[in-house]
């Protein structure tokens, strides 16, 4: 199981003072050195953390794949076609939210997404959709032409963090069922949101045969503030390995 490191919150810290440090570009390079398999970053429409230049520099400088999270807008599609990240992950986006609050409603957007994704796929950019672990969303993701789905693990993470262990186990089964369906349909399966050093082991043990990659940001950046970025990334990789 691979680790994608989301460096958004390095930029959040920088933007608190609108200065030049800490650099998300340097964070991406350190994550690569520490063994990360991918760099994930979310270029939001309001540019609250990651900036366009961050994306361009990271794509130029890192040697591991770059995953651009983005809203399904024309502006973001044009940026993706220009920069050509290795993967784009479409996510829902509301300006008033603190972080992404749920999966993309692919069922509702099916007709729009089929057309929207054509140019991106022609550019040989992998397409992933960030979705809830629901059968209808998985089936719709395949129908619109996605290559992969990233399952939203936020509900599992919240239940685990609230010590609601039985409900967390039930949510893991829901994630497992969605993963199996996605693989049967020929989709690659990723997962992320709210995962921490504490709650990731149970998820890895249950989903290791189905999920190829986890994308983690806030927990790694939080630990990096105290212990350093390279150590934070290495220790999260160790947590994943301990569950395999």
Image (tube, grey):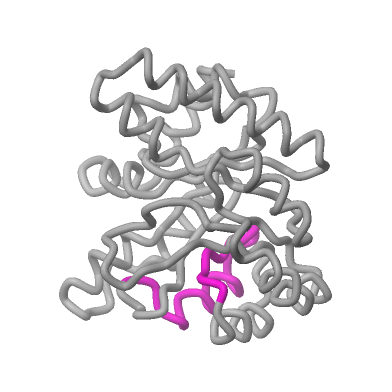
Q: Is residue 232 left or right of residue 223?
A: right
- Expressed as whole percent of the image width and height from the top left, the position of residue 40 reads 51, 58
Q: Nearer the viewer, residue 216 or 242?
A: 216
Of 79 and 174, nearer the camera is: 174
Please tell me whether residue 217 is drawn above or below residue 71 in the rendered image. Answer: above
Residue ID at (68%, 81%):
81
Q: Is residue 208 magenta?
A: no
Q: Which image quarter is the N terminus in?
A: top right
Image quadrant where residue 206 sits:
top right
Where does the image place residue 131, in percent across and percent down from the top left? 55, 49
| Residue at x-position 16% and y-position 76% | 17
215 relative position to 190: left or right: left
How far across and how far down the image is residue 125, in percent?
A: 74, 67
Determine the residue located farthest toward the front in the rendered image: 108
The count of marks equals 0
In the image, residue 25 sits, relative to residue 176, either above or below, namely: below
Left or right: 221, with 45 as reference point: left
Check the image and name the residue furthest to the left.
17
Measuring from the top left, give residue 78's x and y in whole percent.
Answer: 62, 86
- Quarter of the view holding residue 30: bottom left
The magenta segment = 49-72
Q: Is residue 68 magenta?
A: yes
Residue depicted at 28% across the width and 78% down the height: 20
Q: Quarter of the image containing the C terminus? A: top right
For image coordinates 76% across by 45% down, the residue present is: 187
Side (left or right) of 163 relative to 33: left
């Amino acid at each position: 199981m691979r680790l994608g490191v989301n460096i958004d919150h390095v930029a959040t810290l920088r933007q608190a003072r609108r200065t030049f440090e800490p650099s998300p570009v340097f964070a991406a390079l350190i994550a690569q050195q520490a063994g990360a398999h991918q760099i994930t970053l979310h270029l939001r429409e309001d540019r609250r953390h990651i900036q366009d230049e961050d994306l361009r520099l990271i794509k130029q400088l890192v040697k591991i794949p770059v995953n651009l999270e983005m809203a399904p807008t024309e502006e973001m599609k044009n940026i993706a076609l220009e920069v050509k990240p290795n993967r784009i992950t479409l996510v829902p986006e509301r300006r008033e939210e603190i972080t992404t609050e749920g999966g993309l409603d692919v069922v509702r957007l099916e007709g729009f997404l089929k057309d929207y994704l054509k140019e991106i796929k022609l550019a040989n950019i992998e397409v992933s959709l960030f979705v809830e672990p629901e059968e209808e969303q998985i089936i719709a993701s395949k129908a619109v032409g996605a290559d992969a789905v990233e399952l939203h693990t936020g509900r599992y993470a919240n239940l685990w963090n609230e010590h609601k262990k039985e409900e967390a186990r039930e949510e893991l089964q829901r994630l497992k069922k969605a993963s199996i369906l996605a693989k049967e349909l020929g989709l690659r399966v990723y997962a992320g949101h709210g995962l921490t050093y504490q709650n990731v082991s149970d998820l890895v043990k249950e989903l290791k045969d189905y999920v190829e990659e986890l994308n983690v940001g806030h927990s790694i950046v939080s630990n990096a503030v105290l212990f350093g970025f390279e150590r934070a990334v290495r220790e999260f990789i160790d947590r994943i390995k301990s569950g395999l």
